[in-house]
Image (cartoon, rainbow, N blue to C red):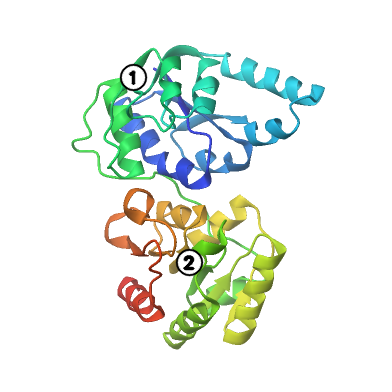
Amino acid sequence: MRILLVKTSSLGDVIHNLPVAIDLARRFPGAAIDWAVEEGFAGIPRLHPAVRRVIPVAVRRWRKRLLSPATWREIGEFRRAAGADSYDAVLDTQGLLKSALIASQARGTKLGHSADSAREPLAARFYDRTFSIPRELHAVERNRRLAAAALGYSLEGLPLDYGISAPPLVAPWLPTWRHEGEYAVLLTATSRADKEWPEPDWQALGTALIAMGMRCVLPGGSQPERERAARLATSLGRAVAAPAMDLAELAGLLAGASLVVGVDTGLVHLATALGRPTVALYCASDPTLTGVLAGERAINLGGPGAPPSAGAVVAAARGLL
């Protein structure tokens, strides 16, 4: 059996789709599972042992250079890659017009959300068969239920499993920490200012973790994010602001952590998928449908306009250690 999964972005959405791959591998042993995904997130499905081939797309980049001959050459290369195999099922769990158009380039029966279920109802017109999945379910559960309905299997007896692992990071600035004891990763950066957690609260959390015998690692992507990480690390003492890292290195950093605390960002979902004890902090968004999901190992705190207190986060972290 040959199956193409279409879930292109964002990072959190891609991670939420990982359990679909392990469900399919368990229900259809020996199935060839491919995955179309944005090039910047291609490293995530590559971590999954059930995924045979990753087909990168670059819609975000192509949109900015739509008149460039190089863009159209890349689009042509993607179409050839997507059409290289004939699939028994082309499953679009994203339910957007762009993902439906990507799915349409592959050979095989197109399966996806019905108009009342898709995030963009127009996407349903591009599928051969559609399925209505309740909107009030968590994103992970919606993905799993859509795949089960589309390919005709039951989720009974299939526990939630993201199916990925990563080797702990080996880096010049980290080894002595890993020999001396445990470290916590503090993910302070997010895509919107209203999703950020106040620096004094990060200070209080880091101080509490250090008092528990932990060390703290603070990654950052952009220059302002790294500057904030450096400020916090300097003030905490038993902490380090991590250098710039790619997605594979970040996965390794998270995989070796004893605890991850982060704001609403894709990396906090990656920590959860890697099986790390995780506390996710919500200040402007609702975690009900898209929060971290991994049983007792993952805790969501806060909500729109109601950021969690430092004391509540410390207590949650203590409970996971």
Quarter of the picture containing the C terminus is bottom left
Q: Toward the viewer: 300 or 270?
A: 300
**x and y percent of residue 172 in the render?**
68, 69
Q: Is residue 237 visible?
A: no
Of labels 1 and 2, the one closer to you: 1
Q: Which amino acid type is marked by label 1? A: Thr
In the rendered view, would you say 161 is above or below 108?
below
At 53% from the left and 14% from the top, the residue drawn is 85
Can the viewer see residue 296 in this picture?
Answer: yes
Occupied quadrant, residue 285:
bottom left
- Please name whichever residue, 224 or 29, is drawn nearer the observer in this view of the structure: 224
The residue wearing badge 1 is 130
User: Hey, what amino acid is under mark 2?
Assistant: Ala
Residue 313: x percent and y percent? 38, 75
Read off the residue under disc 2: 257
Which callout, 1 or 2, points at the residue further toward the start of the chain?
Answer: 1
- The quarter holding residue 158 reads top left
Residue 186: x and y, percent? 51, 70
- Mark 2 residue crowding within 10 angstroms, few (<14) / some (14–19) / many (20+): many
Q: Nearer the viewer, residue 115 or 79?
A: 115
Label 1 sits on a secondary structure element that is: strand
